Image (tube, helix red, strand yellow):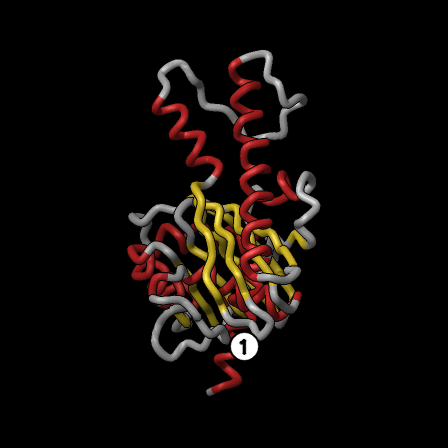
Amino acid sequence: MLLAIDSGNTNIVFAVYEGENLKGKWRASSDAKRTADEYGVWLTHLMVLDDLKVEEISASIVATVVPETVFSLKNLCRKYFKTDPLIVGNAGVEIGVDILIDDPDEVGADRLVNAAAAHQRYGGPLIVIDFGTATTFDVVNESGSYCGGVIAPGINLSLDALHMAAAKLPRVAVQKPKAVIGKKTVSAMMSGVYWGYVGLIEGVLNRIKAEYGSQMCVVATGGLAPLFAAELPAIEHLDNDLTLRGLSEIYRRNIQSV
């Protein structure tokens, strides 16, 4: 079985695959100071609770946008699972995506993994929206090449900034409000964030499609994607396991090429 690790700025997700079948998935908050032993105790315990045996893990792959986590995640794979992990972005690791931008090294590993997985399942051209720490829009052409994208502040980042910059504005949860016009401060903030992001997403998608010059499939992923997909008819596919499935596919690609 394969251990796939997707390490982002806010959350880190661990998943176990047997072939193409997802056997288990667990999420923790990201912390660059967390050690391999801390990850190991937490993860192996959760695997046992889900009737998965640690000794059946035979391979591992890691994608991270936080370079400081690489050391601990490598040690986790080696010490607790007896595997030498593939690291997405390292020389020799084939992703299967041509990068058609000015500086390919600037593209986050997660965005390339998403591009590969989305094109494999949905074809192209397409736009992948990832509702993460940042809200990203990634463009993939007909042949599966990565063409660039758009990066906007994530929804929770915007809420934090609003709270920090205005002393009288509280922290609020991200959810769809009952009405657009808020009758209280909290409902007004919820409306501004929710409908503001709906408008942002609609506007960016329309401009990308106009610039690209053709119809494009739109795929959404990330923790908050389900909350917005219902209000955005342009989103054709909601795929919460897109990055993890991409890691699984990249692992198989590299094993087959050896």
Q: Position of residue 195 (x, y in %)?
A: 59, 31
Q: Position of residue 3 (x, y in %)?
A: 50, 65
Residue drawn at 41 percent across, 26 percent down: 162
Residue drawn at 53 percent across, 61 percent down: 139
Q: Position of residue 117 (x, y in %)?
A: 57, 66
Residue drawn at 37 percent across, 68 percent down: 104
Q: Is residue 63 in view? A: yes
Q: Is residue 249 left or right of residue 86?
A: right
Nearest to the observer: residue 129 or residue 17: 129
Nearest to the observer: residue 151 or residue 34: 151
Secondary structure type for disc 1? helix
Residue 241's image quarter? Answer: bottom right
Q: Is residue 48 in view? A: no
Residue drawn at 43 percent across, 33 percent down: 158
**Residue furthest to the bottom:** 258
Disc 1 marks a residue whose amino acid type is: Arg
Nearest to the observer: residue 11 or residue 192: 192
Q: Position of residue 76 (x, y in %)?
A: 37, 61
Eyeballing the image, is 73 above or below 174?
below
Eyeballing the image, is 1 above or below 134?
below
Eyeballing the image, is 10 above or below 88?
above
Within 10 Å of disc 1 (Cα), the crowding (few <14, some 14-19, many 20+) is: some
Nearest to the observer: residue 210 or residue 26: 210
Query: Where is mark 1, residue-wise?
Result: 252
